Amino acid sequence: MIRIVLVHGFSMRGFSLRGKERLKELKKVIKKQFPETEIVEPEYFERYKRGLFFVKKSIPNYAAVVLDMIGEIDDDTIFVGYSSGGLIVRWMVEELGVSAKAVILVGTPNKGIKISWWEKIIQRIIRVPCVEDMKDNSEFLQRLNKGLNSLPRNYYYLGGRHDKRVPLESSLPEEILRDTKRYVGAEIFWTDHSGLIPKASKGKISVISAIPAIIRILKKEIET
Protein backbone atom coordinates (compact mmCIF):
# COMPACT_ATOMS: atom_id res chain seq x y z
CA MET A 1 0.00 0.00 0.00
CA ILE A 2 1.22 3.49 -0.88
CA ARG A 3 1.72 5.75 2.12
CA ILE A 4 1.35 9.49 1.76
CA VAL A 5 2.89 11.52 4.57
CA LEU A 6 1.64 15.11 4.89
CA VAL A 7 3.99 17.34 6.87
CA HIS A 8 2.48 20.71 7.72
CA GLY A 9 4.26 23.99 8.26
CA PHE A 10 3.77 26.36 11.17
CA SER A 11 2.66 29.89 11.79
CA MET A 12 4.98 32.73 12.69
CA ARG A 13 2.09 34.15 14.72
CA GLY A 14 1.85 31.79 17.65
CA PHE A 15 -0.07 28.54 17.54
CA SER A 16 0.85 25.79 15.10
CA LEU A 17 -2.71 24.61 14.58
CA ARG A 18 -3.10 26.85 11.56
CA GLY A 19 -0.46 24.88 9.71
CA LYS A 20 -1.99 21.53 10.62
CA GLU A 21 -5.55 22.59 9.90
CA ARG A 22 -4.61 23.84 6.44
CA LEU A 23 -3.75 20.32 5.28
CA LYS A 24 -7.08 18.84 6.37
CA GLU A 25 -8.77 19.82 3.12
CA LEU A 26 -5.85 18.46 1.10
CA LYS A 27 -6.21 15.18 2.99
CA LYS A 28 -9.92 14.98 2.08
CA VAL A 29 -9.17 15.51 -1.61
CA ILE A 30 -6.38 12.91 -1.60
CA LYS A 31 -8.54 10.37 0.22
CA LYS A 32 -11.36 10.88 -2.26
CA GLN A 33 -9.05 10.48 -5.26
CA PHE A 34 -6.95 7.62 -3.86
CA PRO A 35 -9.07 5.70 -1.31
CA GLU A 36 -6.62 2.78 -1.18
CA THR A 37 -3.73 4.86 0.08
CA GLU A 38 -2.71 5.34 3.71
CA ILE A 39 -2.47 9.00 4.68
CA VAL A 40 -0.28 9.91 7.65
CA GLU A 41 -0.38 13.32 9.35
CA PRO A 42 2.30 13.62 12.02
CA GLU A 43 1.19 16.27 14.52
CA TYR A 44 4.68 17.03 15.66
CA PHE A 45 3.88 20.24 17.56
CA GLU A 46 1.86 18.23 20.09
CA ARG A 47 5.17 17.08 21.53
CA TYR A 48 5.93 20.69 22.41
CA LYS A 49 2.74 22.09 24.00
CA ARG A 50 1.02 22.47 20.63
CA GLY A 51 3.78 24.60 19.21
CA LEU A 52 3.51 27.80 21.19
CA PHE A 53 5.83 30.39 19.69
CA PHE A 54 8.25 30.50 22.58
CA VAL A 55 8.79 26.74 22.80
CA LYS A 56 9.38 25.95 19.12
CA LYS A 57 12.40 23.75 18.43
CA SER A 58 14.83 23.47 15.53
CA ILE A 59 13.85 21.87 12.24
CA PRO A 60 16.16 18.86 12.84
CA ASN A 61 14.40 18.41 16.23
CA TYR A 62 11.03 18.32 14.49
CA ALA A 63 12.35 15.98 11.80
CA ALA A 64 13.39 13.48 14.48
CA VAL A 65 9.93 13.71 16.06
CA VAL A 66 8.13 13.27 12.72
CA LEU A 67 10.29 10.26 11.89
CA ASP A 68 9.52 8.72 15.25
CA MET A 69 5.79 9.32 14.84
CA ILE A 70 5.38 7.85 11.35
CA GLY A 71 7.31 4.70 12.18
CA GLU A 72 8.70 2.32 9.56
CA ILE A 73 9.14 3.81 6.08
CA ASP A 74 9.52 1.88 2.83
CA ASP A 75 10.26 2.83 -0.76
CA ASP A 76 6.54 3.34 -1.50
CA THR A 77 6.25 6.36 0.78
CA ILE A 78 5.42 9.72 -0.78
CA PHE A 79 6.10 12.88 1.23
CA VAL A 80 4.22 16.15 0.80
CA GLY A 81 5.84 19.00 2.73
CA TYR A 82 4.14 22.38 2.90
CA SER A 83 6.18 25.47 3.78
CA SER A 84 8.63 24.64 6.61
CA GLY A 85 7.25 21.09 6.51
CA GLY A 86 9.17 20.71 3.26
CA LEU A 87 12.43 21.44 5.08
CA ILE A 88 11.53 18.80 7.65
CA VAL A 89 10.99 16.31 4.82
CA ARG A 90 14.24 17.29 3.12
CA TRP A 91 16.18 16.82 6.36
CA MET A 92 14.70 13.36 6.86
CA VAL A 93 15.45 12.25 3.31
CA GLU A 94 18.78 13.99 2.69
CA GLU A 95 20.36 13.93 6.14
CA LEU A 96 18.69 11.02 7.94
CA GLY A 97 18.60 8.71 4.91
CA VAL A 98 14.82 8.13 4.86
CA SER A 99 13.59 6.37 1.71
CA ALA A 100 11.00 8.10 -0.46
CA LYS A 101 9.21 7.21 -3.66
CA ALA A 102 8.65 10.93 -4.24
CA VAL A 103 9.01 14.24 -2.41
CA ILE A 104 6.57 17.08 -3.16
CA LEU A 105 7.74 20.44 -1.81
CA VAL A 106 5.02 23.12 -1.70
CA GLY A 107 6.13 26.67 -0.94
CA THR A 108 9.20 25.33 0.80
CA PRO A 109 11.82 27.92 1.83
CA ASN A 110 14.79 26.03 0.40
CA LYS A 111 16.83 29.24 0.44
CA GLY A 112 15.13 30.97 3.34
CA ILE A 113 12.04 32.99 4.23
CA LYS A 114 11.22 36.68 4.07
CA ILE A 115 10.80 38.11 7.56
CA SER A 116 8.86 41.30 8.22
CA TRP A 117 10.26 44.18 10.29
CA TRP A 118 8.15 43.35 13.33
CA GLU A 119 9.16 39.69 13.16
CA LYS A 120 12.80 40.77 13.11
CA ILE A 121 12.19 42.74 16.30
CA ILE A 122 10.57 39.71 17.94
CA GLN A 123 13.51 37.57 16.83
CA ARG A 124 15.91 39.87 18.65
CA ILE A 125 13.95 39.36 21.86
CA ILE A 126 13.06 35.69 21.46
CA ARG A 127 15.35 33.60 19.29
CA VAL A 128 13.22 30.76 17.95
CA PRO A 129 15.41 27.88 16.65
CA CYS A 130 13.19 26.82 13.73
CA VAL A 131 12.92 30.41 12.48
CA GLU A 132 16.67 30.85 12.82
CA ASP A 133 17.07 27.72 10.66
CA MET A 134 14.97 29.29 7.91
CA LYS A 135 17.00 32.48 7.58
CA ASP A 136 18.76 32.62 4.23
CA ASN A 137 22.24 32.64 5.77
CA SER A 138 21.60 29.99 8.42
CA GLU A 139 24.01 27.13 9.07
CA PHE A 140 21.06 24.77 8.69
CA LEU A 141 20.29 25.81 5.10
CA GLN A 142 23.95 25.98 4.18
CA ARG A 143 24.40 22.39 5.32
CA LEU A 144 21.17 21.20 3.71
CA ASN A 145 21.92 22.79 0.33
CA LYS A 146 25.65 22.11 0.22
CA GLY A 147 25.31 18.48 -0.83
CA LEU A 148 22.62 19.14 -3.43
CA ASN A 149 24.86 19.15 -6.51
CA SER A 150 22.11 17.89 -8.82
CA LEU A 151 18.33 17.92 -8.58
CA PRO A 152 16.85 14.68 -7.23
CA ARG A 153 14.69 13.06 -9.90
CA ASN A 154 11.93 12.21 -7.45
CA TYR A 155 11.58 15.80 -6.18
CA TYR A 156 8.75 18.13 -7.21
CA TYR A 157 8.90 21.87 -6.55
CA LEU A 158 5.70 23.95 -6.36
CA GLY A 159 5.84 27.70 -5.73
CA GLY A 160 3.62 30.77 -5.73
CA ARG A 161 4.40 33.72 -8.01
CA HIS A 162 2.94 36.15 -5.46
CA ASP A 163 4.37 34.42 -2.40
CA LYS A 164 5.88 37.11 -0.17
CA ARG A 165 6.86 34.67 2.58
CA VAL A 166 8.69 32.20 0.32
CA PRO A 167 9.50 33.82 -3.03
CA LEU A 168 10.16 31.72 -6.13
CA GLU A 169 13.91 32.19 -5.86
CA SER A 170 13.66 30.28 -2.57
CA SER A 171 11.04 27.63 -3.35
CA LEU A 172 12.47 26.72 -6.77
CA PRO A 173 16.13 25.79 -7.35
CA GLU A 174 18.12 28.27 -9.44
CA GLU A 175 18.59 25.96 -12.40
CA ILE A 176 14.82 25.43 -12.60
CA LEU A 177 14.15 29.17 -12.53
CA ARG A 178 16.51 29.64 -15.45
CA ASP A 179 14.35 27.38 -17.61
CA THR A 180 11.14 26.18 -15.93
CA LYS A 181 9.87 24.54 -19.12
CA ARG A 182 12.65 21.95 -19.02
CA TYR A 183 11.56 20.54 -15.67
CA VAL A 184 8.31 18.61 -15.46
CA GLY A 185 8.79 18.50 -11.69
CA ALA A 186 8.38 22.25 -11.19
CA GLU A 187 5.25 24.36 -11.35
CA ILE A 188 4.49 28.02 -10.59
CA PHE A 189 1.06 29.19 -9.47
CA TRP A 190 -0.47 32.68 -9.54
CA THR A 191 -1.06 32.79 -5.82
CA ASP A 192 0.49 33.72 -2.49
CA HIS A 193 1.84 31.45 0.24
CA SER A 194 -1.51 30.66 1.87
CA GLY A 195 -3.13 30.21 -1.53
CA LEU A 196 -0.86 27.29 -2.43
CA ILE A 197 -2.85 25.03 -0.11
CA PRO A 198 -5.95 27.08 0.74
CA LYS A 199 -8.78 26.22 3.04
CA ALA A 200 -11.88 25.08 1.16
CA SER A 201 -14.52 27.67 0.40
CA LYS A 202 -17.98 26.05 0.40
CA GLY A 203 -16.41 22.74 -0.48
CA LYS A 204 -14.55 24.10 -3.51
CA ILE A 205 -10.80 24.26 -4.02
CA SER A 206 -9.32 27.23 -5.84
CA VAL A 207 -8.19 26.26 -9.33
CA ILE A 208 -5.09 28.44 -8.98
CA SER A 209 -3.93 26.54 -5.89
CA ALA A 210 -1.31 23.78 -5.93
CA ILE A 211 -3.81 21.09 -4.90
CA PRO A 212 -4.76 19.97 -8.46
CA ALA A 213 -1.05 19.69 -9.27
CA ILE A 214 -0.40 17.68 -6.10
CA ILE A 215 -3.18 15.27 -7.08
CA ARG A 216 -1.75 14.99 -10.60
CA ILE A 217 1.73 14.23 -9.24
CA LEU A 218 0.36 11.66 -6.79
CA LYS A 219 -1.55 9.95 -9.60
CA LYS A 220 1.62 9.73 -11.68
CA GLU A 221 3.71 8.36 -8.81
CA ILE A 222 1.08 5.93 -7.59
CA GLU A 223 0.55 4.46 -11.04
CA THR A 224 4.27 3.92 -11.71
Image (tube, rainbow, N blue to C red):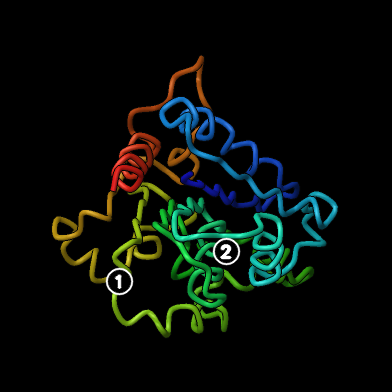
Question: Mark 1: which amino acid?
Answer: Leu
Check if mark 2's residue and mark 1's residue have beta carbons within 8 Å. Answer: no
Q: Look at 34% across and 34% down and name the residue there.
A: 212
Residue highlighted by disc 1: 151
Q: Which of 103 and 83 is in front in this view?
A: 103
Going by the picture, which residue comes out furthest to the top?
A: 202
Q: In this view, does 22 lie above or below 62?
A: above
Q: Secondary structure beneath disc 2?
A: helix
The location of residue 81, given as percent across then percent down, is 50, 53
Going by the picture, which residue comes out furthest to the right?
A: 49
Label whose residue precedes the other's in the sequence (2 or 1): 2
Residue highlighted by disc 2: 88
Q: Look at 46% across and 58% down and name the residue there.
A: 108
Q: Classify mark 2: residues with Cα within 10 Å, few (<14), some (14-19) or many (20+).
A: many
The location of residue 160, given as percent across then percent down, is 37, 48
Q: Classify mark 1: residues with Cα within 10 Å, few (<14), some (14-19) or many (20+).
A: few
The location of residue 145, given as percent across then percent down, is 43, 79
**In which quadrant of the rendered view does residue 189 lie?**
top left
Task: Locate residue 103 relative to residue 135 in the image: left or right.
Answer: left
Q: Which of 190 and 212 is in front in this view?
A: 212
Q: Secondary structure beneath disc 1?
A: loop
Give the total number of marks visible in the rendering.
2
Q: Which of 215 and 20 is in front in this view?
A: 215
Task: Locate residue 25 relative to residue 66 in the image: left or right.
Answer: left
Going by the picture, which residue comes out furthest to the front?
A: 1
Q: Look at 37% across and 43% down and name the residue there.
A: 218
Question: Mark 2: which amino acid?
Answer: Ile
Q: In this view, does 4 lie above or below 142?
A: above
Task: Locate residue 65 relative to residue 117 in the image: left or right.
Answer: right
Q: Which of 175 and 97 is in front in this view?
A: 97
